[in-house]
Image: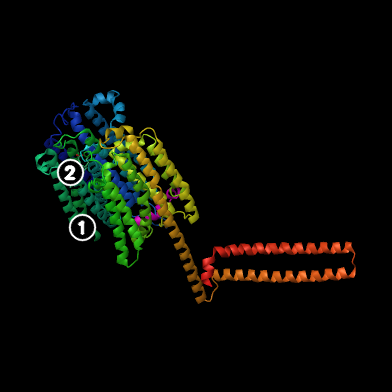
Amino acid sequence: MVQVTRAAAIATAAAAGTLAVALIVGGAASEEVIPGLADAGEFTRWGLPAARVVMDLTAALTVGALLAATLLLPLDVTGGKGRLSGDATAYLRASSWLAAGWAAAAAATLVFTVSDVLGEPVDLILTGDRLSGYVGDLPQGTALLLVILMAVVVALLARTTATPGGALALLALAGIALLPPPLTGHAASAANHSVAVTGLALHVAAVAPWVGGLAMLGRHALTGGGRLEVMADRYSRMALWCYVAVGVSGIANVVSRLPDPADLVTSDYGRLALGKIVLFGVLGWFGWWHRRRTLPALADRRPHAFARLASVEVAVMAAVMGLAVALARTAPPAPALEEDAVQVLLGYPMPPQITLGNVVTLWKLDFFFALLVVVLGGLYLAGLARLRSRGDRWPIGRTVAWFIGLLTIVLVTQSGLSRYAPVLFSMHMVQHMTLGMLTPIFLVLGAPVTLALRALRPARIRGDRGPREWITILLHSRYVSVLTHPVVAAAIFVVSMFALYFTPLFQNAMRNHLGHIAMEVHFLAAGTLFFWVLIGVDPAPRRLPHVAKLVVLFATMPFHAFFGIALMNLGEPIADGWYRAVHPQWATSVLTDQHTGGAIAWGFGEIPTIIVLVALVGQWFLDDERTARRKDRQADRAAARHENDELAEYNARLAALARHDEQTEAERAAAKKTAGKKTAAKKAGSGKPGTAGTAEKTGTAEKSDAQKSGAAEKAGSAGAADEAEGAEPVGEDAT
Ligand code: HEM
């Protein structure tokens, strides 16, 4: 434990030392951090970055402890049922304290931020009503408040949670809590904010598990914790991906702020960034050395070299975190050309008159969707490669569908269309309709979950949970069951459309880059859920009959048409403030363009309906064929074993019913013949009308009984015939 405390103290000192040096060298420690703003005093100038470093470090440690509890340490499988091991529970409880520290550091950062923005000392902020007034108005204030709330929830629940699923949910919550501050810092107002915002979010999301995970692994090694080799192996596989993500996003961050590479050496911001790049290289060397030397030693149960190197590595990481905060406090060089108001809002200059040529040629990188496509495409290819290496086959149609889906995302988010979508409602609608109604159809036909389940290996330790087991658990969970209920999926698909466009939500989403990404991801996710229920080929909690799928499709699509018609008939522009602010001179009026958008929404609904119908009919046909082939195989197998199979028994039952029908018919005919003879004899013998009447009555009674039983039998046969009809292909094929 002494070693852990010493390592923690060294890391803290490294973070504090680098922060101080970088603040002085970069100029952020001097007065007037941002020219033109009042200075809040020395305490705030040093207190804000210090609180921020503590916040970043405790956030990373919370994520690391939750990661250790859920994904790095294997479950305890004694007694058959996988549960959190003693060590994992200890990490979970530790995450509670760390999250409490995170919340406290975020609260301190909030106070210092308000003090910094208003240029007033902290004591004034704490005593007056400035804090409560500015928290809601200031995006950074709201972001930090969200962090405090989420961290407090993690701190409270981590004390009582006992299940692996609950711990994983806390890890997800902690992951979400990392994002609000970087997304509302100066990245949100950077010149190319599409790259800056996504880049910083990815950067921070990759740094936390990388740094926090290593800190926990180092602690585990220093304290002689159990299953260290398993933990190290899992961490090292994850760390490689985090390293790549941190590097790529870090470079994207720098490029978005320093368009001129010369700024890397001529500006304070550039020099600090260069320092980070050098330290990043040093961290790469640590990783390489671990793989070469210390991990093999650890596998041989000699953990000391690993523990020592990991402690030094964590100290370097903490130093980079200090440098990162100083970098975030340093103003990047001002852009060479003054930006106009539209460019500030859009993050790029107003595009020229819209023409097909411009839409096709004026491509623009949307970092978020580019990354999404690369990750989804890469994972799919990796899955295919795994199947191929095992000699397994995968239908080519699914692969084609998946990549067509990804291509549609590229076309609407990276081509010239993405330049016009924020300024023309009609082009936004093309983007929305494609992402919400066309892309999902192809993606669900790609069967990604089936591919993942086939490609991923089961957990190495029996009863433990790896990615494959987590996917299976998620698929069987009640949340997925509720979400994939056709009524719920259809309601999300339809209601969210009306809720977005006919409330102020749309305007807010257009104004904020993060909101814009969230809106587009929502279209994609809601569409994917809806079409997964309808035509998805992946395993799902419930399988709807084909007829029910058609009913859901035809019950939902009219709402979509109403939506388009409602837009076409609106007399007032929606998101008026936004569209007027970015209205191009060459365009028609905002309202006319909105009506065009409504017509596009209305007309577009037909395309997915036709594709889904074709897919449904195809699946129906293939299902029938598959069932027939299965029954054939069963029959063949049964015949080979000289056993009765289900189909043979069914056919025998039908044959027995037919024999029974014939027999009854013959008996009825015989009874009729006998009755006719008797009547004739009676008529010939007595000739009394009364007797004849009685005899007729008896005959009628007999006949009606016969009719009744005949009808009953017929009903029976009809039922059987119906069944036989239903099973027609099977019966026909079998004979
Ligand atoms: C190729 C290497 C790297 C580059 C180019 C890079 C660059 C950047 C840039 C430009 C920012 C944005 C600063 C701002 O808001 O103006 C940033 C933020 C950040 N970086 Fe890095 N970085 C790199 C590696 C790392 C590493 C290795 C770590 C941690 C171990 C790290 C941790 C962070 C953190 C925590 C932030 C957010 C700071 C805050 O806003 O509180 N970075 N980085």
| Callout 2 amino acid | Val
Magenta part, dominant SS: helix
Residue 299 on the magenta span? no
Regarding mark 1 in the picture, which secondary structure is present there?
Answer: helix
Where residue 10 appears, x then y in whole percent?
A: 18, 43
> Which of 225 and 442 lies nearest the eye of the viewer?
442
Name the one closer to the observer, 302 or 434: 434
Q: Is residue 224 visible?
A: no
Q: Is mark 1 within 8 Å of ligand 1?
A: no
Q: Amino acid at mark 1?
A: Arg
Q: Position of residue 165 (x, y in %)?
A: 39, 49
Relative to 304, 431 lies left or right: right
Please name the residue shown 59% across and 71% down the image.
652
Where 326 falls versus 309 (above or below)?
above
Question: From where the camera sits, is residue 636 visible?
Answer: yes
Which contiguous range is marked in magenta? 467-482
Residue carrying label 2: 254
> N-terminal of the two: label 2 or label 1?
2
Count neighbours of disc 2 (C-alpha within 10 A) and say few if under 14, some if 14 to 19, many if 20 or more.
Answer: many
Residue 549 marker: none
| C-alpha span from label 2 to label 1 | 29 Å
Tag shown at residue 291: 1
Asked whether 570 or 659 is in front, the reply is 570
Residue 477 lies within the magenta run: yes
Task: Assign ligand 1 to one image quadrant.
Answer: top left
Looking at mark 2, is its residue's CB closer than 8 Å to ligand 1? yes
